[in-house]
Each structure stands twice: as C-alpha cells, then as structure tokens.
Image (cartoon, helix red, strand yellow):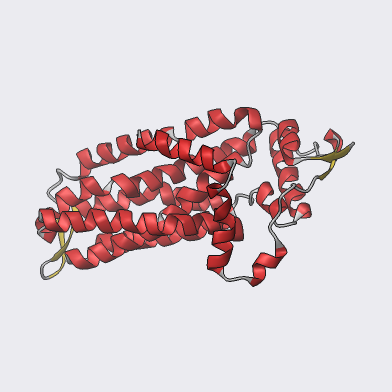
Amino acid sequence: MGEYNIDDALKVIGFGRMHFIIFICCVTQQMFISNEQFGISLVIVAASCDYYVSEHRMSWLMFSTFAAQVSTSHFMGYQADKIGRRKLLLIASVLCIFSSFMSSLMPDFWSFLAFRFLVGVFVPGPGMALLTYLSEFTKVELRPKVINFLYYAIGFSLIYMAAVAMYVLPLDLRLRVHKDYAITSWRILMWAQLVPGIISCFMLWGMPESPKYYLSVGKSNEAYAVLERCCRYNKGKDVTLKSLGIDSLKKPESQVDPSLAQKRACTRIWYETKPIFQRPLLTKMLLIMFRGLA
C-alpha cells in the first residue's frame, strides 16, 4: 500500500477493455483528421465543374488549407495543456465537422475556400491532442506499439475515402434545390468524410480526461478517479485501486506554474516553447526535424 507515480499505476492497471475503447475512439478520430487533410483531393476533382476550378484556384485552396494548419497547430498544442486533451478534442472536432459540413453546402468557390480555411484552422486541434491523449492512458511498455497501430488509421482513411469515392462519384446524382444549386455526388462524398469524426465525438463524450493532465494542473483526486474507472473497466467492478495497493498518486516533478495564469497567452506560449530551443531538447528537436525532412 502506498503512493504510486502515474506510470507505475498504469502498469498495475494494465491494458484492458477501457483502453481498447479509448483506442477505437482515437482511431476513428485519426481517420477523420486524415479524411479532412487528404480527402479534399478527391472532392475537388469532382467539384471542379461546379466551381470552375482552375490551376490558380486549386493553388489557392491548397495554400489556404495548409497555411491555416501551420498557423494554428502550435496554439492548439498549448490549448491541449491549458484546457485538457479531451476538451480540446471535443471542441476542435465539433468545430471542424461543422466547418467541413458548411463547406460542402457552399454555392461558389470562394465561400467554399473560406470554410475550408476554417477546417484548416480547427483540424490541428485533434491532431495535436490525439497522440498525447492516447499515450497518457497507456503504460510505458506498450506506448510505441499502440501509437504505431494508431497511425494505421491513416491508411484506413485513404482506403475508406477511395472506396466511398468509387461508389458515390460515378452516380449521376443532381438533386436540384434552387435554380443552379443542387446536391451532387461530391457533396455526399464530403458528408461521408465526416462519419468517423461524428462517431469519435460521440465516443469522446463518455470518455474521461487524461489523468496526467489532471496531475499537471494539481488535480490529484480527479486523476485518481479516472484511474479508478479504468481499473474497474479492466479488472472488474469489485477491483479497486486500493485493493491493488494504490492509495494515492505522486505529484509530477514539473507542474503548471500558477504565476503563468496571470500572464498573457502569448507570454505563456513562449514560456512553454522556450525549452525546445535550449539543451537538452534542442538536439532532439533538430534530429526529429532532420528525419522529417529526409
């Protein structure tokens, strides 16, 4: 009986039913992210007749979408540490689904471009928080394998989008709504992109927040309650953390500095970003960047 750190507690709890549910939730979320990032290449080919998409307009679409992702990804990572991984996943996913759905209804190219820009603004939210959320529920020994399997969802997404496109796009579908505006097959394809995201949002609604996030903001009781729930799901309703010898959780060595709460958002972001430009993280960051570019 005693005080455990979070990684030792996760090792005792093991990888069971609760973790499989969280894993499926994260896989569907990753499929949705990939659908939004890569699925537009299938959609825009079919939409080119309605929107008169030239090479110039195509370049505007690709530039605006990826520029939005680059400009907000760092801020989304900061928000994951500020408001929590699950909360960011839910908020950003819902906004991304809404923006994508609205883009599918737009009657002209420039309004379509505006909403695709908003999709690019929100899609880094789940992209930033997803990996952290899943890894913080997984014991250290299994993390590399679980994360590796998570990214199989990118391949599933590409197969899913291609399969749906093969079935939907050849359909001679044109449901006229008003004058020159009609519901066509490419709009339905865009709706199909949203299905994994909608499923994931419903699953996330019932999922707990990351226990490591709770510990990082000094909420030890909430972190203990989350692990208690995982323990009962994995080992049975009669098994508790106390019965496994876990009375409490150790506070992490580094916690959020309370004085930062009084500072502006930009100051807090820089304070949390600065360590990656200093040793020992600088060398590791440069190595990761080199591997990514290679």
Q: Work out whether residue 146 or residue 124 is closer to the camera in this orientation and state it.
A: 124
Q: Position of residue 156 (x, y in %)?
A: 37, 35
Question: Does residue 97 appear anywhere in the picture?
Answer: no
Number of numbered markers:
0
Question: Residue 56 appears in which quarter of the rendering?
Answer: bottom left
Horizontally, residue 117 falls left or right of residue 146, namely left
Q: Work out whether residue 262 or residue 17 is closer to the camera in this orientation and state it.
A: 262
Q: Residue at x 55, y 30 (%)?
A: 144
Q: Residue at x 54, y 28 (%)?
A: 145
Q: Residue furthest front?
A: 279
Horizontally, residue 7 falls left or right of residue 144, namely right
Q: Residue at x 60, y 60 (%)?
A: 82
Vertical arrangement, residue 206 with respect to residue 147, above or below:
below
Q: Position of residue 141 (x, y in %)?
A: 64, 27
Q: Work out whether residue 46 or residue 238 is closer to the camera in this orientation and state it.
A: 46
Q: Position of residue 201 (x, y in %)?
A: 49, 53
Q: Quadrant of the N terminus?
A: top right
Q: Quadrant of the C terminus?
A: top left
Q: Position of residue 153 (x, y in %)?
A: 42, 36
Q: Residue furthest right?
A: 1
Q: Residue at x 73, y 41 (%)?
A: 6
Horizontally, residue 49 falls left or right of residue 128, namely left
Question: Does residue 127 appear anywhere in the picture?
Answer: yes
